[in-house]
Image (cartoon, grey):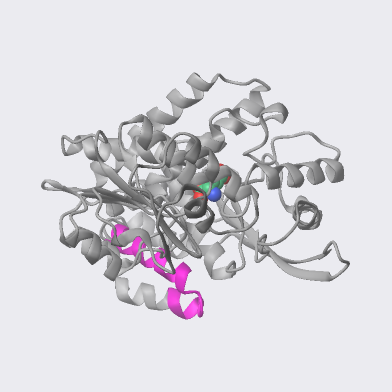
Amino acid sequence: MSMKEFIYQVEARNPNQPEFLQAVKEVVESVWQVYESKPRYKEAKILERIVEPERVIMFRITWARDNGEVMVNRGYRVEFNSAIGPYKGGLRFHPSVNLSILKFLGFEQTFKNSLTTLPMGGGKGGSDFNAKGKSDSEIMRFCQAFMSELFRHIGPNTDVPAGDIGVGGREIGFLFGMYKKLKNEFVGVLTGKGLNWGGSLIRPEATGFGAIYFAKEMLALKNETFEGKTVAISGFGNVSWGTTIKVNELGGKVVTLSGPDGYIYDKDGIKDDKVDYLLEMRASNRDMVKDYADKYGVPFYEGKKPWEVKCDIALPCAIQNELNGDDAALLVKNGVKFVAEVSNMGCTPEAIKVFQEAKLPFAPGKAVNAGGVTVSGLEMSQNSLRFNWSREEVDEKLKKIMIDIHEQCVKYGKDNDYVDYVKGANLAGFLKIANSMLDQGLV
Ligand code: GLU
Protein backbone atom coordinates (compact mmCIF):
# COMPACT_ATOMS: atom_id res chain seq x y z
CA MET A 1 0.00 0.00 0.00
CA SER A 2 1.27 3.48 -0.82
CA MET A 3 1.10 6.38 1.62
CA LYS A 4 -1.68 7.92 -0.49
CA GLU A 5 -3.72 4.72 -0.29
CA PHE A 6 -3.16 4.50 3.44
CA ILE A 7 -4.36 8.07 3.98
CA TYR A 8 -7.32 7.46 1.69
CA GLN A 9 -8.30 4.47 3.83
CA VAL A 10 -8.13 6.52 7.03
CA GLU A 11 -10.23 9.24 5.38
CA ALA A 12 -12.86 6.72 4.31
CA ARG A 13 -13.07 5.27 7.82
CA ASN A 14 -13.33 8.67 9.51
CA PRO A 15 -15.63 10.88 7.46
CA ASN A 16 -16.40 14.37 8.71
CA GLN A 17 -13.41 14.43 11.04
CA PRO A 18 -11.17 17.09 9.43
CA GLU A 19 -9.07 17.89 12.50
CA PHE A 20 -8.38 14.24 13.19
CA LEU A 21 -7.40 13.59 9.56
CA GLN A 22 -5.14 16.64 9.57
CA ALA A 23 -3.28 15.33 12.62
CA VAL A 24 -3.01 11.82 11.17
CA LYS A 25 -1.71 13.02 7.78
CA GLU A 26 1.02 15.07 9.40
CA VAL A 27 2.30 12.08 11.38
CA VAL A 28 1.97 9.59 8.53
CA GLU A 29 3.93 11.85 6.17
CA SER A 30 6.72 12.11 8.77
CA VAL A 31 7.05 8.40 9.54
CA TRP A 32 6.12 6.70 6.26
CA GLN A 33 9.66 6.22 4.99
CA VAL A 34 10.80 4.53 8.20
CA TYR A 35 7.58 2.52 8.38
CA GLU A 36 8.12 1.22 4.84
CA SER A 37 11.63 0.11 5.71
CA LYS A 38 10.59 -2.02 8.72
CA PRO A 39 8.73 -5.19 7.72
CA ARG A 40 8.01 -5.93 11.39
CA TYR A 41 5.92 -2.76 11.69
CA LYS A 42 4.06 -3.45 8.47
CA GLU A 43 3.30 -7.07 9.28
CA ALA A 44 1.89 -6.05 12.66
CA LYS A 45 -0.10 -3.23 10.95
CA ILE A 46 1.26 -0.79 13.50
CA LEU A 47 0.18 2.29 11.56
CA GLU A 48 -3.37 0.99 10.98
CA ARG A 49 -3.60 0.27 14.71
CA ILE A 50 -2.05 3.53 15.89
CA VAL A 51 -4.68 5.67 14.09
CA GLU A 52 -7.54 3.75 15.70
CA PRO A 53 -8.43 4.79 19.29
CA GLU A 54 -8.50 1.86 21.70
CA ARG A 55 -11.81 3.07 23.12
CA VAL A 56 -14.21 6.01 22.67
CA ILE A 57 -16.72 6.85 25.38
CA MET A 58 -19.57 9.29 24.68
CA PHE A 59 -22.22 10.23 27.19
CA ARG A 60 -25.05 12.58 28.07
CA ILE A 61 -24.64 15.22 30.74
CA THR A 62 -27.79 16.66 32.26
CA TRP A 63 -27.67 19.55 34.71
CA ALA A 64 -29.69 22.58 35.71
CA ARG A 65 -28.91 26.30 35.50
CA ASP A 66 -29.35 28.60 38.51
CA ASN A 67 -32.79 29.62 37.17
CA GLY A 68 -33.88 25.99 36.88
CA GLU A 69 -33.44 25.65 33.10
CA VAL A 70 -32.44 22.10 32.21
CA MET A 71 -29.29 21.78 30.11
CA VAL A 72 -28.07 18.84 28.04
CA ASN A 73 -24.43 18.58 26.99
CA ARG A 74 -22.37 15.84 25.42
CA GLY A 75 -19.35 14.35 27.19
CA TYR A 76 -16.46 12.35 25.76
CA ARG A 77 -13.34 10.46 26.68
CA VAL A 78 -11.17 9.15 23.87
CA GLU A 79 -8.79 6.51 25.26
CA PHE A 80 -6.38 6.51 22.36
CA ASN A 81 -3.34 4.44 23.15
CA SER A 82 -2.04 2.68 26.26
CA ALA A 83 1.16 1.14 24.85
CA ILE A 84 3.47 3.05 27.17
CA GLY A 85 1.28 3.83 30.18
CA PRO A 86 -2.23 4.62 31.42
CA TYR A 87 -4.25 6.90 29.12
CA LYS A 88 -3.25 10.47 29.96
CA GLY A 89 -4.44 13.80 28.64
CA GLY A 90 -6.65 16.74 29.37
CA LEU A 91 -10.33 17.56 29.32
CA ARG A 92 -11.51 20.41 27.10
CA PHE A 93 -14.73 22.27 27.87
CA HIS A 94 -15.51 24.47 24.87
CA PRO A 95 -18.56 24.86 22.61
CA SER A 96 -16.50 23.71 19.58
CA VAL A 97 -15.74 20.30 21.13
CA ASN A 98 -16.73 17.32 18.97
CA LEU A 99 -15.40 13.84 18.25
CA SER A 100 -13.04 14.96 15.48
CA ILE A 101 -11.36 17.50 17.75
CA LEU A 102 -11.02 15.10 20.66
CA LYS A 103 -9.65 12.35 18.42
CA PHE A 104 -7.05 14.72 16.98
CA LEU A 105 -6.11 15.80 20.49
CA GLY A 106 -5.95 12.21 21.80
CA PHE A 107 -3.83 11.17 18.83
CA GLU A 108 -1.42 14.08 19.27
CA GLN A 109 -1.29 13.43 23.00
CA THR A 110 -0.09 9.87 22.41
CA PHE A 111 2.99 11.14 20.54
CA LYS A 112 3.55 14.04 22.92
CA ASN A 113 3.47 11.79 25.95
CA SER A 114 5.89 9.41 24.28
CA LEU A 115 8.33 12.31 23.78
CA THR A 116 8.30 13.18 27.50
CA THR A 117 10.04 9.86 28.30
CA LEU A 118 7.52 9.37 31.14
CA PRO A 119 5.24 6.29 31.25
CA MET A 120 2.00 7.79 29.92
CA GLY A 121 -0.32 6.64 27.14
CA GLY A 122 -2.57 9.08 25.29
CA GLY A 123 -6.15 10.19 25.78
CA LYS A 124 -8.36 13.25 25.67
CA GLY A 125 -11.87 14.15 26.69
CA GLY A 126 -14.23 16.96 27.34
CA SER A 127 -17.56 18.47 26.52
CA ASP A 128 -19.25 21.10 24.36
CA PHE A 129 -20.04 23.01 27.58
CA ASN A 130 -19.68 26.79 27.25
CA ALA A 131 -18.57 28.47 30.48
CA LYS A 132 -19.13 31.96 29.08
CA GLY A 133 -21.69 33.76 31.19
CA LYS A 134 -22.15 30.86 33.60
CA SER A 135 -21.98 31.37 37.37
CA ASP A 136 -19.38 29.58 39.50
CA SER A 137 -22.07 27.34 40.98
CA GLU A 138 -23.28 26.42 37.49
CA ILE A 139 -19.72 25.48 36.58
CA MET A 140 -19.51 23.36 39.72
CA ARG A 141 -22.78 21.54 38.98
CA PHE A 142 -21.73 20.91 35.41
CA CYS A 143 -18.38 19.44 36.55
CA GLN A 144 -20.18 17.20 39.04
CA ALA A 145 -22.63 15.99 36.39
CA PHE A 146 -19.74 15.32 33.99
CA MET A 147 -17.86 13.28 36.59
CA SER A 148 -20.99 11.35 37.62
CA GLU A 149 -20.51 9.42 34.36
CA LEU A 150 -16.78 9.71 33.71
CA PHE A 151 -15.78 8.26 37.11
CA ARG A 152 -16.55 4.67 36.07
CA HIS A 153 -14.10 4.83 33.15
CA ILE A 154 -11.02 6.37 34.77
CA GLY A 155 -8.59 5.57 37.59
CA PRO A 156 -5.00 6.27 38.65
CA ASN A 157 -3.74 3.16 36.80
CA THR A 158 -6.26 3.32 33.93
CA ASP A 159 -6.84 6.83 32.69
CA VAL A 160 -5.76 10.10 34.31
CA PRO A 161 -7.43 13.25 32.92
CA ALA A 162 -6.24 16.81 33.52
CA GLY A 163 -7.06 20.30 32.26
CA ASP A 164 -7.13 21.82 28.80
CA ILE A 165 -9.09 24.76 27.35
CA GLY A 166 -11.89 25.65 29.79
CA VAL A 167 -10.62 23.30 32.48
CA GLY A 168 -8.24 24.82 35.03
CA GLY A 169 -7.58 24.44 38.75
CA ARG A 170 -11.15 25.40 39.67
CA GLU A 171 -12.76 22.77 37.44
CA ILE A 172 -10.24 20.08 38.43
CA GLY A 173 -11.22 20.74 42.06
CA PHE A 174 -14.93 20.21 41.37
CA LEU A 175 -14.22 17.11 39.27
CA PHE A 176 -11.90 15.62 41.89
CA GLY A 177 -14.37 16.25 44.71
CA MET A 178 -17.09 14.37 42.84
CA TYR A 179 -14.80 11.45 41.92
CA LYS A 180 -13.74 11.07 45.54
CA LYS A 181 -17.33 11.13 46.75
CA LEU A 182 -18.48 8.52 44.23
CA LYS A 183 -15.55 6.12 44.67
CA ASN A 184 -14.74 6.81 48.31
CA GLU A 185 -11.08 6.85 47.31
CA PHE A 186 -8.51 9.64 47.57
CA VAL A 187 -6.20 8.82 44.68
CA GLY A 188 -4.25 10.60 41.95
CA VAL A 189 -6.95 10.17 39.32
CA LEU A 190 -6.60 13.71 37.97
CA THR A 191 -3.62 16.01 37.60
CA GLY A 192 -3.53 19.76 37.94
CA LYS A 193 -4.87 19.38 41.47
CA GLY A 194 -4.60 22.11 44.14
CA LEU A 195 -1.37 22.23 46.15
CA ASN A 196 -3.13 21.35 49.41
CA TRP A 197 -4.62 18.14 48.04
CA GLY A 198 -2.04 16.35 45.94
CA GLY A 199 -1.14 18.87 43.26
CA SER A 200 2.40 19.53 42.07
CA LEU A 201 4.27 22.79 42.31
CA ILE A 202 4.88 24.35 38.86
CA ARG A 203 1.92 22.49 37.26
CA PRO A 204 0.00 25.73 36.51
CA GLU A 205 3.10 27.31 34.94
CA ALA A 206 4.34 24.10 33.29
CA THR A 207 3.00 24.38 29.73
CA GLY A 208 4.25 27.94 29.30
CA PHE A 209 7.57 27.42 31.11
CA GLY A 210 8.22 24.20 29.19
CA ALA A 211 7.44 25.90 25.88
CA ILE A 212 9.97 28.63 26.56
CA TYR A 213 12.62 26.12 27.74
CA PHE A 214 12.09 24.41 24.38
CA ALA A 215 12.10 27.66 22.39
CA LYS A 216 15.27 28.72 24.21
CA GLU A 217 16.97 25.62 22.76
CA MET A 218 15.65 26.45 19.27
CA LEU A 219 17.13 29.92 19.58
CA ALA A 220 20.41 28.62 21.03
CA LEU A 221 20.89 26.41 17.98
CA LYS A 222 20.92 29.63 15.95
CA ASN A 223 23.14 31.40 18.50
CA GLU A 224 20.24 33.58 19.65
CA THR A 225 18.59 34.30 23.00
CA PHE A 226 15.30 35.83 24.17
CA GLU A 227 17.08 38.97 25.37
CA GLY A 228 15.51 42.00 23.66
CA LYS A 229 13.21 39.93 21.41
CA THR A 230 9.65 41.00 20.65
CA VAL A 231 7.19 38.14 21.06
CA ALA A 232 3.64 37.91 19.69
CA ILE A 233 1.37 35.43 21.45
CA SER A 234 -2.31 34.57 21.16
CA GLY A 235 -4.79 33.56 23.84
CA PHE A 236 -5.00 34.93 27.39
CA GLY A 237 -5.48 31.76 29.45
CA ASN A 238 -3.24 29.56 31.53
CA VAL A 239 -0.81 28.76 28.70
CA SER A 240 -0.39 32.41 27.64
CA TRP A 241 0.14 33.33 31.29
CA GLY A 242 2.98 30.84 31.93
CA THR A 243 4.57 31.66 28.59
CA THR A 244 4.54 35.40 29.30
CA ILE A 245 6.13 34.98 32.74
CA LYS A 246 9.03 32.97 31.32
CA VAL A 247 9.60 35.23 28.28
CA ASN A 248 9.83 38.20 30.68
CA GLU A 249 12.27 36.31 32.90
CA LEU A 250 14.55 35.69 29.91
CA GLY A 251 14.52 39.35 28.84
CA GLY A 252 11.98 39.18 26.00
CA LYS A 253 8.88 41.35 25.57
CA VAL A 254 5.37 39.96 24.94
CA VAL A 255 3.30 42.57 23.08
CA THR A 256 0.02 40.82 22.22
CA LEU A 257 -2.78 38.72 23.71
CA SER A 258 -5.94 37.58 21.99
CA GLY A 259 -9.41 36.24 22.64
CA PRO A 260 -12.46 35.27 20.59
CA ASP A 261 -13.20 39.01 20.36
CA GLY A 262 -9.87 40.20 18.86
CA TYR A 263 -6.37 41.07 20.06
CA ILE A 264 -4.65 43.71 22.16
CA TYR A 265 -1.28 45.34 21.45
CA ASP A 266 0.76 46.51 24.42
CA LYS A 267 3.95 48.13 23.13
CA ASP A 268 5.44 48.34 26.65
CA GLY A 269 5.12 44.61 27.15
CA ILE A 270 2.81 42.51 29.30
CA LYS A 271 4.59 42.49 32.63
CA ASP A 272 4.24 42.86 36.41
CA ASP A 273 0.60 43.20 37.56
CA LYS A 274 -0.57 43.02 33.93
CA VAL A 275 0.46 39.35 33.92
CA ASP A 276 -1.65 38.66 37.03
CA TYR A 277 -4.59 40.31 35.28
CA LEU A 278 -4.69 37.37 32.85
CA LEU A 279 -5.79 35.16 35.73
CA GLU A 280 -8.56 37.61 36.60
CA MET A 281 -9.82 37.63 33.00
CA ARG A 282 -10.00 33.84 32.99
CA ALA A 283 -11.78 33.70 36.37
CA SER A 284 -14.39 36.24 35.20
CA ASN A 285 -15.99 33.72 32.76
CA ARG A 286 -16.36 36.59 30.25
CA ASP A 287 -14.05 35.09 27.61
CA MET A 288 -12.92 38.41 26.15
CA VAL A 289 -9.55 40.13 25.92
CA LYS A 290 -10.92 43.64 25.35
CA ASP A 291 -11.08 43.99 29.16
CA TYR A 292 -7.26 44.22 29.13
CA ALA A 293 -7.35 47.11 26.63
CA ASP A 294 -9.98 48.93 28.70
CA LYS A 295 -8.02 48.48 31.92
CA TYR A 296 -4.57 49.47 30.64
CA GLY A 297 -5.51 51.88 27.83
CA VAL A 298 -3.84 49.98 24.99
CA PRO A 299 -5.18 49.42 21.45
CA PHE A 300 -7.70 46.62 20.83
CA TYR A 301 -8.26 45.24 17.32
CA GLU A 302 -11.71 43.75 17.08
CA GLY A 303 -12.05 40.49 15.16
CA LYS A 304 -8.33 40.47 14.25
CA LYS A 305 -5.51 38.04 15.01
CA PRO A 306 -2.16 39.11 16.47
CA TRP A 307 -0.14 37.74 13.53
CA GLU A 308 -0.18 41.10 11.77
CA VAL A 309 2.20 42.75 14.26
CA LYS A 310 5.94 42.96 13.72
CA CYS A 311 7.72 40.44 15.95
CA ASP A 312 10.83 38.26 16.21
CA ILE A 313 9.06 35.25 17.67
CA ALA A 314 5.45 34.09 17.21
CA LEU A 315 3.89 31.74 19.75
CA PRO A 316 0.30 30.63 19.08
CA CYS A 317 -1.08 29.74 22.54
CA ALA A 318 -4.84 29.50 21.97
CA ILE A 319 -6.44 26.76 19.85
CA GLN A 320 -5.97 24.52 16.79
CA ASN A 321 -5.63 26.09 13.34
CA GLU A 322 -5.45 29.60 14.76
CA LEU A 323 -2.62 30.55 12.38
CA ASN A 324 -3.23 29.96 8.66
CA GLY A 325 -1.18 30.25 5.47
CA ASP A 326 -1.95 33.95 5.01
CA ASP A 327 -1.04 34.71 8.63
CA ALA A 328 2.23 32.79 8.16
CA ALA A 329 3.08 34.72 4.98
CA LEU A 330 2.42 38.01 6.79
CA LEU A 331 4.61 37.00 9.73
CA VAL A 332 7.46 36.03 7.39
CA LYS A 333 7.08 39.27 5.45
CA ASN A 334 7.29 41.21 8.72
CA GLY A 335 10.53 39.47 9.67
CA VAL A 336 9.56 36.76 12.16
CA LYS A 337 12.57 34.56 12.98
CA PHE A 338 11.14 31.68 15.03
CA VAL A 339 7.71 30.11 15.39
CA ALA A 340 6.77 27.61 18.09
CA GLU A 341 3.25 26.23 18.46
CA VAL A 342 2.27 26.27 22.10
CA SER A 343 -1.34 25.39 21.33
CA ASN A 344 -2.08 21.90 19.99
CA MET A 345 -1.89 21.99 16.15
CA GLY A 346 -2.04 25.80 16.26
CA CYS A 347 -0.89 26.14 12.66
CA THR A 348 -2.64 24.88 9.54
CA PRO A 349 -0.62 22.64 7.14
CA GLU A 350 -0.41 25.63 4.75
CA ALA A 351 1.13 27.78 7.49
CA ILE A 352 3.71 25.10 8.34
CA LYS A 353 4.63 24.88 4.67
CA VAL A 354 5.22 28.65 4.50
CA PHE A 355 7.54 28.55 7.54
CA GLN A 356 9.45 25.50 6.35
CA GLU A 357 9.91 26.86 2.84
CA ALA A 358 11.28 30.06 4.34
CA LYS A 359 13.75 27.80 6.27
CA LEU A 360 12.48 29.28 9.48
CA PRO A 361 12.79 27.17 12.63
CA PHE A 362 9.23 25.97 13.28
CA ALA A 363 8.32 23.51 16.07
CA PRO A 364 5.00 21.70 16.54
CA GLY A 365 2.79 21.74 19.64
CA LYS A 366 3.34 18.11 20.53
CA ALA A 367 6.99 18.92 21.27
CA VAL A 368 6.73 22.55 22.40
CA ASN A 369 3.80 22.22 24.81
CA ALA A 370 4.78 18.85 26.30
CA GLY A 371 5.80 20.59 29.53
CA GLY A 372 2.21 20.59 30.78
CA VAL A 373 1.74 16.87 30.60
CA THR A 374 5.33 16.37 31.77
CA VAL A 375 4.57 17.99 35.10
CA SER A 376 1.30 16.03 35.14
CA GLY A 377 3.47 12.90 34.90
CA LEU A 378 5.61 14.22 37.74
CA GLU A 379 2.42 14.88 39.74
CA MET A 380 1.45 11.23 39.23
CA SER A 381 4.88 10.14 40.49
CA GLN A 382 4.58 12.34 43.56
CA ASN A 383 1.08 10.97 44.27
CA SER A 384 2.40 7.40 44.03
CA LEU A 385 5.28 8.26 46.35
CA ARG A 386 2.90 10.13 48.67
CA PHE A 387 5.48 12.88 48.69
CA ASN A 388 5.94 16.38 47.26
CA TRP A 389 9.01 17.67 45.47
CA SER A 390 10.13 21.28 45.89
CA ARG A 391 9.57 23.95 43.25
CA GLU A 392 13.24 23.76 42.27
CA GLU A 393 13.16 19.96 41.93
CA VAL A 394 10.08 20.00 39.67
CA ASP A 395 11.40 22.90 37.59
CA GLU A 396 14.76 21.18 37.14
CA LYS A 397 13.12 17.95 35.96
CA LEU A 398 10.85 19.89 33.58
CA LYS A 399 13.80 21.77 32.11
CA LYS A 400 15.79 18.59 31.61
CA ILE A 401 12.89 16.86 29.83
CA MET A 402 12.23 19.83 27.52
CA ILE A 403 15.92 19.95 26.56
CA ASP A 404 15.77 16.21 25.92
CA ILE A 405 12.66 16.58 23.70
CA HIS A 406 14.48 19.25 21.72
CA GLU A 407 17.45 16.89 21.30
CA GLN A 408 15.16 14.09 20.07
CA CYS A 409 13.64 16.48 17.50
CA VAL A 410 17.08 17.44 16.25
CA LYS A 411 18.25 13.81 16.15
CA TYR A 412 15.30 12.62 14.06
CA GLY A 413 14.56 15.82 12.13
CA LYS A 414 17.96 17.19 11.09
CA ASP A 415 18.42 17.51 7.34
CA ASN A 416 21.76 19.19 6.54
CA ASP A 417 21.61 22.43 8.49
CA TYR A 418 17.79 22.67 8.74
CA VAL A 419 15.92 20.99 11.58
CA ASP A 420 12.48 19.73 10.57
CA TYR A 421 10.99 19.71 14.08
CA VAL A 422 7.69 18.32 12.79
CA LYS A 423 9.35 15.23 11.37
CA GLY A 424 11.70 14.93 14.35
CA ALA A 425 8.89 15.03 16.93
CA ASN A 426 6.63 12.67 15.01
CA LEU A 427 9.32 10.11 14.31
CA ALA A 428 10.82 10.10 17.79
CA GLY A 429 7.36 9.79 19.35
CA PHE A 430 6.27 7.11 16.90
CA LEU A 431 9.25 4.77 17.29
CA LYS A 432 8.79 4.36 21.03
CA ILE A 433 5.05 3.69 20.74
CA ALA A 434 5.46 1.34 17.77
CA ASN A 435 8.14 -0.71 19.48
CA SER A 436 6.08 -0.96 22.67
CA MET A 437 3.05 -2.11 20.67
CA LEU A 438 5.17 -4.75 18.95
CA ASP A 439 6.45 -6.01 22.31
CA GLN A 440 2.90 -6.39 23.63
CA GLY A 441 1.53 -8.48 20.77
CA LEU A 442 -1.87 -8.25 19.13
CA VAL A 443 -3.96 -6.30 21.62
N1 GLU B 1 -4.10 19.44 28.05
C1 GLU B 1 -2.68 19.44 28.18
C2 GLU B 1 -2.04 18.96 26.90
O1 GLU B 1 -2.56 19.26 25.83
C3 GLU B 1 -2.21 18.72 29.44
C4 GLU B 1 -2.60 17.29 29.57
C5 GLU B 1 -2.25 16.66 30.92
O2 GLU B 1 -1.64 17.31 31.74
O3 GLU B 1 -2.59 15.49 31.08
O4 GLU B 1 -1.02 18.35 26.85
Residue at the (71%, 48%) spot, across then down: 154
Residue at the (80%, 52%) spot, across then down: 137
Residue 371 visible in the current orientation: no
Q: Position of residue 362 (x, y in %)?
A: 26, 52
Residue most toward the right? 68
Look at the image and give the residue range highlighted in magenta: 10-32
Relative horizontal placement of residue 411, taking residue 287 as reference (left or right): left
In the rendered image, the vertical position of residue 126 relative to residue 361, given as above or below: below
Q: Position of residue 252 (x, y in %)?
A: 30, 37
Residue most toward the left? 416
Residue most toward the front? 297
Relative horizontal placement of residue 62, taking residue 217 as reference (left or right): right
Please say whether residue 239 is one of the residues in the magenta stretch. no
Snapshot quadrant of residue 73: bottom right
Q: Position of residue 284 (x, y in %)?
A: 65, 51
Closer to the camera in the image, 439 or 49: 49
User: In what quadrant of the picture does the C terminus appear?
Assistant: bottom right
Relative horizontal placement of residue 54, taking residue 233 as reference (left or right): right
Magenta span dominant secondary structure: helix
User: In what quadrant of the picture does the N terminus appear?
Assistant: bottom left
Residue 159 visible in the current orientation: yes
Relative horizontal placement of residue 293, taking residue 265 as reference (left or right): right
Residue at the (36%, 59%) spot, across then down: 306
